[in-house]
Amino acid sequence: MSAVTATIPALTNDLLIGNEWGAEQIRELYHLSADIKARPERYRSALAGRFLALIFEKPSLRTRVTFEVGISSMGGGAVFLDHTQSRLGDRESVHDVAKNLERWVQGIVARVFEHKLLEELAENAGIPVINALSDRSHPCQALADFFTLEERFGNVRGLKIAYVGDGNNVCHSLLIIGARLGAHIRVATPAGYEPDAAVVSEARRLARENRGKIEILRSPIEAANGAHAIYTDVWASMGQEDEAAQREAIFAPYQVNSSLFDHAEAECIFMHCLPAHRGSEVATEVIDSPRSIVFEQSENRLHVQKAILLTLLG
Ligand code: CP
Ligand code: NVA
């Protein structure tokens, strides 16, 4: 039996925000991800002779390891370009980096401080560019998270997902992908930490098209009411370390602890993209409880990203 291949082409050859892919493309991606997860041996040579540059301006455990292992396990090669000590564009222009890389490799995976650097790479390189996290979004994370939710619940249409905490990059991607798949996403943040208005407006547009629902709230209890999943992320993202102490105080009422689950469905699960800070955004009793599916999320980063690579480069 032959391996599953994506038949519906992606709308663009880059994955920068996540709204590049329609619901049908995501369905195909999940079909491929499930086959890769069940039968990885079928894909041993799927990226043979293909190389990717991995440019990281920020630290990473999950994203780096899952891309490197994913590429190697399909016979391809990854070249890690460590930019954690120097910004992309410092030594030579982003334009010239893109124009060089396209001569040697078949794709770029990049984690950057400023989202516009990804757009500049994509504009100048005639090869796929995959967002490995920017200040604005983290589409690989959200694509893996909704795959994980579908494994658990069968379908995410109408599923109530409460995101409690900072309206950050991860929140943005959950809004976009969740809206596309028809989920009901409720976000609760302190005043001044809401998700970006343009992202919310795009998510609402996608939700209207896909019978999803987006609510931006203040109260974590209101968000958790009847929820099937409660999701949180760090209160200070990479690059916001200077604000960490101030944010600890502001976000304290937004900690996801066991009493928040009293308002949710009995079987409500806990999700976090990781890394997590036990005792801050999530109580230890929650992240280490049977409700927690954080390591399922991490595992699925591998399978879903392999499917993303095959969809864009295969
Ligand atoms: N969730 C996630 O992207 O983790 P890393 O920062 O370790 O890659
Ligand atoms: N919001 C976090 C996510 C880390 C995976 C950050 O940007 O640091």
Image (cartoon, rainbow, N blue to C red):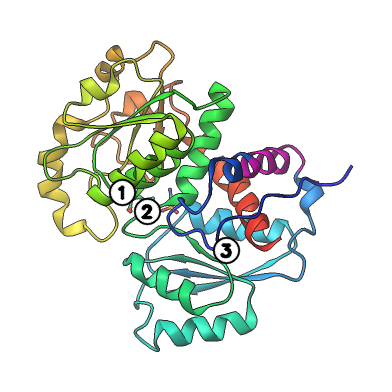
- For label 3, the residue is 13
- Choose between 67 and 18: the one closer to the eye: 18
Image: magenta residue range = 28-39
Instruction: Name the mark nearer the viewer: 2 or 3.
Output: 3
Q: Are marks 1 and 2 in contact (CB under 8 Å)?
A: yes
User: Please, is residue 13 above or below residue 24 in the view?
Assistant: below
Q: What's the residue type where badge 1 is placed?
A: Val
Q: What's the residue type where badge 2 is placed?
A: Ser
Q: Which mark is residue 173?
A: none
Q: What's the residue type where badge 3 is placed?
A: Asn
Alpha carbon separation for disc pair 1 and 2: 10 Å
- Choose between 199 and 239: the one closer to the eye: 199
Indicate the secondary structure of the residue bearing disc 2: loop
Q: Which percent across, then down, holds residue 15?
A: 50, 58
Instruction: Name the mark nearer the viewer: 1 or 2.
Output: 1
Q: Are marks 2 and 3 in contact (CB under 8 Å)?
A: no
Q: Check the picture and name the quadrant holding the C terminus.
A: bottom right
Q: Which percent across, then down, holds residue 243?
A: 14, 54
- Choose between 56 and 100: the one closer to the eye: 100
- Point out the tag, 2 or 3, that comes first from the N-terminus: 3
Q: Which mark is residue 137?
A: 2
Q: Is residue 119 visible?
A: yes
Alpha carbon separation for disc pair 2 and 3: 17 Å
Q: Which percent across, then down, holds residue 289?
A: 41, 22
- Magenta stretch contains residue 254: no
- Point out the tag, 1 or 2, that comes first from the N-terminus: 2
User: Please, is residue 277 above or below residue 183 in the view?
Assistant: below
Alpha carbon separation for disc pair 3 and 1: 21 Å
Indicate the secondary structure of the residue bearing disc 3: loop
Residue under the image location 37 percent in, 72 percent down: 117
Q: Are marks 3 and 1 in contact (CB under 8 Å)?
A: no
Q: Which mark is residue 199?
A: 1
